[in-house]
Amino acid sequence: MSKSYTILLADDDPEILALFEYILAPLTQVRLETVTDGSEAITRCKEVQPDLILLDHEMPGLDGFSACQVIRRMYPNPNCEIWFVTGRAMESDLPMAQEAGATCIIPKPFDPNKMRNRIAQALGIELPS
């Protein structure tokens, strides 16, 4: 039996939520949990204990940086990477993102196939042929 993985995606853009459902569909061992703000991300993180967290930088309510800091304090799993997936990514944001506990910043728009490959690699999943 193959291992299953949970990805928590926090983004307030319905198109991004749908895009990630498309991106992850071929990865049958991945379950996608979606929320639309930082506070919901914190709550769902406690409930599902994800293997990978994808956070938008700007969301209503609690932003991605603040949510990341809280998640790292309450869920300090060093094996769980937190990626910022944002349309406002600048090189100057990387130190602040890393200080908040994020692994990397991925700028929008991104290539869906490259994103699928990157997620699969991060989780140790072999892509289907």
Image: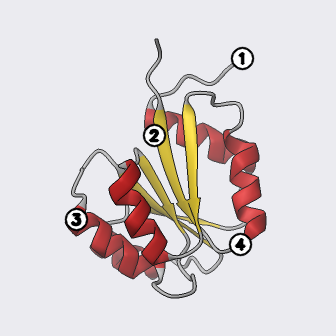
Residue visible at 69% across and 52% down? 20
- What residue does disc 4 label? 13
Seen from the viewer's position, the closer of residues 22 and 36 is 36
Could you classify mark 4 by the number of other residues whose Cα lies within 10 Å: few (under 14), some (14-19), or many (20 or more)? few
Question: Which numbered disc, 3 or 1, marks the residue that appears first in the sequence?
Answer: 3
Which secondary structure lies at badge 3?
A: helix
Question: Which numbered disc, 2 or 1, marks the residue that appears first in the sequence?
Answer: 2
Residue 92, position in %: x, y? Answer: 45, 82
- What residue does disc 1 label? 129
Seen from the viewer's position, the closer of residues 71 and 110 is 71
Mark 3 vs mark 1, CA separation in Å? 38 Å
Residue 4, position in %: x, y? Answer: 47, 29
- What residue does disc 3 label? 74
Mark 4 vs mark 2, CA separation in Å? 24 Å
Residue 91, position in %: x, y? Answer: 49, 76
- What residue does disc 2 label? 122
Among the 4 quarters of the image, the one containing residue 79: top left
Question: Which numbered disc, 4 or 3, marks the residue that appears first in the sequence?
Answer: 4
Label 2 near label 4: C-beta < 8 Å? no
Mark 4 vs mark 3, CA separation in Å? 26 Å
